[in-house]
Image (cartoon, coloured by chain):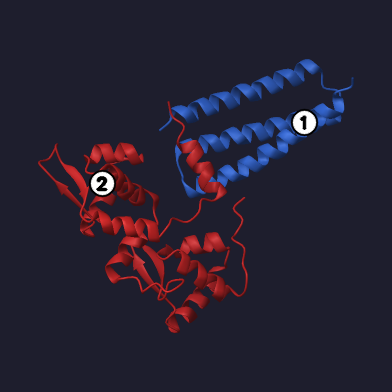
Amino acid sequence: MDFSAWTNAAFAAVAVFGLVLFGLSLLAVRRAPSPRMGLVATGFLVVALQGIVIAILLFTGGAPLDLLLFLSAIFEVLLLVVLFAATLVR
Amino acid sequence: MEAPLERSGTWAETLLTFIQRYPGVHLREIRRRLGIPIGTLDYHLYRLGKQGLVSVRMQGGYKVCFPETLIGEGPPIPEPDKVLIALLRQPVPRAILLQLYLEGAASPQAVGAAVSASGPNLSYFLKRLEALGVIDRQGAPGQRLVRLRDAKRIHEILLRYPPLPETAIDRFVRFWSELHP
């Protein structure tokens, strides 16, 4: 079974929903400015960037799977670090 | 994201209905909820005020609006209640009064923990509520208790004037703000 089209669509969806949630979190920062809300917004920005970068690499083709997985893992680690910090900060 | 409320009829009608439904609402909140341009809002508030339908006053640095007549047969809002109602449009003082109404007298620290308010924020609103004659602070420093002066009045006000409904942004802020270990 060929998953390539589904993979492209899934990362495009990550980019779209990441951007939507990033927009929502910017409005939230404006409404209730706090370090935590800033970190949450950063987290959603990381998700959106992950979707955009991986989707572009997938659509253009040529990027080795190892590189895609590595980049994806880096974004995931960044996201988890940011959300961890958001959970700890008061 | 934060869709303005549905508008039926003219801006004047929408504005009057909104102010009648949520007396004490402040100007920025009206703009945000109705998506009404500031010039249009000022114009219609001036017209409604001139016709004796609404009144606008400054309170705590905000311009707040009151209807001269409530929806239905309700009597005009008594003057002392207006200041309190406008204050209760903010979540912290509303939560403080509800906490004191449900749980009775408590120390300021216990109230602060229950409503998740920081020290300076809690202290500010306790002072405001005390100045309005809504609460009393009794006892020696360190053993001080906060209590409602007239629980029946607070019961009526909390029921009669519900808070504005939460928007998607409010829910987003609440959800992420409540996360802590």
Farthest-out residue, right: A1
Farthest-out residue, bottom: B51
Above or below, B169 against B107 in this view is: below
Q: Residues within 10 Å of mark 1 (few under 14, many from 20)?
A: some
Question: In the figure, is residue B36 to the left or right of B125?
Answer: right
Q: Are marks 2 and 1 in contact (CB under 8 Å)?
A: no
Q: For residue A82, what is the image quadrant?
A: top right
Task: Give the percent coordinates (x, y) of residue A39.
Answer: 52, 34
- The mark found on residue B123 in the picture is 2
Above or below, B115 against B155 in this view is: above
| Subunit of label 2 | B
User: Which residue type does callout 1 highlight?
Assistant: Ala
**Residue A25 appears in view:** yes
Task: Give the percent coordinates (x, y) of residue A64.
Answer: 82, 18
Above or below, B170 against B35 in this view is: above
At numbered mark 1, what does the secondary structure look like: helix, strand or loop? helix
Q: Chain in red?
A: B
Q: CA distance from mark 2 to mark 1?
A: 49 Å
Q: Residue at x 42, y 74 (%)?
A: B73
* In the foreground, B162 or B12: B162
Q: Chain in blue?
A: A
The number of numbered badges drawn on the structure is 2
| Subunit of label 1 | A
Farthest-out residue, left: B140
Question: In the figure, is residue A8 to the left or right of A79?
Answer: right
Q: Label 1, on which residue? A: A10
User: Which residue type does callout 2 highlight?
Assistant: Ser
Task: Give the percent coordinates (x, y) of residue B79.
Answer: 29, 71
Q: Residue at x 30, y 50 (%)?
A: B97
